[in-house]
Amino acid sequence: MQNVQLLKFYDSRGCPTICAYLKYENEIIKAIAPAGKSTGSHEVISYPLDKGKPNIDLSFKFFKENRKTIEQGFDFDNQEEFDSLLEELDESPNFQEIGGNLTIALSMLFLKFKAKQNGLEVFEYLNPKAKIKDLPKPLGNSFGGGVHSNNKIPVQEFLITNNKKLVSENIKLNIEVYKKIEEQLKNKKIFFGKNDEGAITADINFNDAIGFVEKAIDIVGEKSKYGLDVAASEFYKNKKYEFEKNKYSETEFVSFWDSFLKKHKNVMYVEDPFFEDSFDAFASLQKKTKALICGDDLYTTNKERLQEGIKKKSSKAILIKPNQIGTLSRMYDTVNLAHKNNIDCVISHRSGESCDTTIAHLAVGLKGINYIKTGTVSGERLAKLNELILIESLLK
């Protein structure tokens, strides 16, 4: 039986999170849970609630009380058995007793442990026949607004992407575009900083931000594309979208994004352009554009919500965040459903991150994950990107 331990680590925002680890053949194997700030209401509970607020210490208490059973689970042969054990320990559908951040840390630890037992890297364990073509295209957060930033831009992320054969080339180009945005701001003497995800942030308006991003792409000259994470639920109030100085009805906001995409041909991806339950609005926009409309808060990596989106043809892409749904097995089910229905999967970091690289391995190891969203230059984001460069070298 494995001796599983928990530690209280701190994420990139300085907030406490859970590190689950064990020692195997004189090597420490660890898994660290991420945490989101812009969260969908349909996500699992991050930590058990105490007077209405998540309390990480209650997850530690639950683990202490159920430790022996959890440790016995590490003798199981497959992921589904172990994750089912976690569900049996907490019979609520959203892990309100144990906390989804504890379950995902343990679920990822189990995966890493099984890979190590078999003498394999995690991506090899999941996909023994992995090839270069299985590496995802990075969506690099280059400029930020919304709840991740202290500025007036409502859109949360401006994402750069490239379509070169090698992931290392795409990462390099994303960084070059990022640096050209910085240079423009310096030249215009506009004060800027970095937000929670290491993206550039400045107190400018949405159209000016678009202008800086598009000019940076032109300067680099490699025909980069870009995308937006609108995170529209954050500014949806009283059935209106409060976007900068305007208020839009849902029908008006569909028209807004339709016109925007017709004007800006370089935009290949728009995430959460509408409120998290607006399946029909997503479908209306996706029908009008060739760009990938992607659901994050719409789906929260939940298979049942994705099934609704498939039925209504709401989007051609889904964001995949393991801790949104609590276990890797649940995440696998959602990815498999998306893959069977030709919906692109975009595996994603959270705004509160660590140097854990599990999502890089999942991106290569699972069929149907075509993109990875994990920042551009910040250390905890580069940990994932550099891991992809390492995997690329192993596959050459």
Image: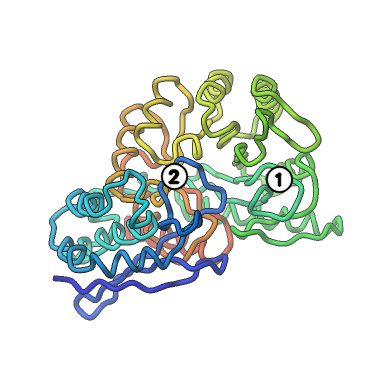
Q: Quarter of the image containing the C terminus? A: bottom left
Give the side of residue 276 with respect to residue 2, left or right: right
Residue ID at (56%, 48%) = 38
Residue 338, compared with residue 89, is above or below; it is above
Q: Secondary structure at mark 1?
A: helix
Q: Position of residue 46 (x, y in %)?
A: 43, 55
Give the side of residue 76 with respect to residue 62, left or right: left
Identify the amino acid type marked 2.
Glu
Q: Earlier in the sequence, mark 2 or mark 1?
A: 2
Q: Quarter of the image containing the N terminus? A: bottom left
Give the side of residue 395 with respect to residue 137, left or right: left
Residue identified by numbered label 1: 213
In this view, the residue in front, 41 or 213, is: 41
Residue ID at (56%, 69%) = 14
Answer whether labels 2 and 1 touch (C-beta < 8 Å).
no
Q: How many marks?
A: 2
Residue identified by numbered label 2: 43
**Residue 65 makes an appearance in the image:** yes
Give the side of residue 199 with respect to residue 26, left or right: right
Residue that protrudes farthest toward the right in the picture: 189
Residue ID at (43%, 64%) = 56
